[in-house]
Amino acid sequence: MKFFIDTANLDQIREANDLGILDGVTTNPSLMAKEGIKGTENQHAHYIKICEIVRGDVSAEVISTDYAGMMKEATELTALHPNIVVKLPCTEDGIKGVRTLADKGVKTNCTLIFSLGQAHLAAKAGATYVSPFIGRLDDISSDGVGLVKKIVEVFNYYGFETEVLAASIRSTQHIIQCMEAGADVATCPLAAIKGLLKHPLTDAGLAIFLADYRKVNNES
Ligand code: G3P
């Protein structure tokens, strides 16, 4: 499974990248706002900074809700760096935009996906990625990981090349469940990724190894 980090925070992106396991980055307008990035020029400069840290796809989301506006933004975003993936919402205009961009060979991430039908249409339109939101479905007593599993099965059945990018991941357990569900990509908060490394037997085993080494080498 590929690991993307779901943040616009440069320090966290650097830290995840330095781990050597990072395949890409996803951002959205809320994550950009959280970093206090205001205005188109600053946002564009920020996307370039992210692309300079990570060797992999970087999703930059359009703000327009109409097709023409989305296409204008897509042109500006893709001019910033070759690794930019245009993120569009799963709406009528968004799906049209995905089709137009796919026909031009531009990578897209169709976001705000909450159903199998939405994912299927996005894949038919030629999306590079579809982003089902796990946490937000769980928030309303729905089954986020279950949706990821269904999308993976149906995409395999029809031979779609679109990658299933599990988003709105809130925990380390969500990441494990995405692996089990066969997600192509999980976009995660840094803390959830680092949680994968935690195991008490690793800590206890390391402590024993170091104590034994110190005993024989006369180190206190
Ligand atoms: O990738 C989408 C993600 O940022 C949404 O996460 O936690 O706001 O539902 P959340």
Image (tube, rainbow, N blue to C red):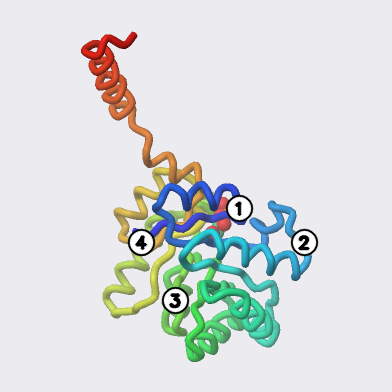
**Where does residue 35 sit, x and y in percent of width and height?**
69, 52
- Which image quadrant is residue 77 in? bottom right
Provide the residue designation for mark 2.
38
Q: State the residue in front, 110 or 151.
A: 110
* Crowd band around label 4 with a 10 angstrom C-alpha radius: few (<14), some (14–19), many (20+): many
Looking at the figure, which quarter contains the C terminus? top left
Q: Is residue 141 visible from the viewing direction of this image? A: no
Provide the residue designation for mark 4.
183
Report ligand 1 position as a quadrant. Answer: bottom right
Q: Nearer the viewer, mark 2 or mark 4?
A: 2
**Tags 2 and 1 touching, CB below 8 Å:** no
Q: Nearer the viewer, mark 3 or mark 1?
A: 1
Provide the residue designation for mark 1.
10
Q: Is mark 1 within 8 Å of ligand 1?
A: no
**Tags 3 and 1 touching, CB below 8 Å:** no
Residue at 51% across, 87% down: 99
- Relative to residue 107, is residue 159 drawn left or right? left
Residue at 42% across, 83% down: 124
Looking at the figure, which quarter contains the N terminus? bottom left
Q: Nearer the viewer, mark 4 or mark 1?
A: 1
Q: Amino acid at mark 3?
A: Thr
Earlier along the polypeptide chain: callout 3 or callout 4? 3
Residue at the outermost right position: 39
- Image height check: is 215 above or below 30? above
Earlier along the polypeptide chain: callout 4 or callout 1? 1
**Where does residue 12 sit, x and y in percent of width and height?**
56, 48
Mark-to-mark CA distance, 3 and 4: 14 Å
Q: Nearer the viewer, mark 2 or mark 1?
A: 1
Provide the residue designation for mark 3.
128
Query: Does dot 4 land on a helix, a strand or a loop?
Result: loop
Q: Is mark 3 within 8 Å of ligand 1?
A: no
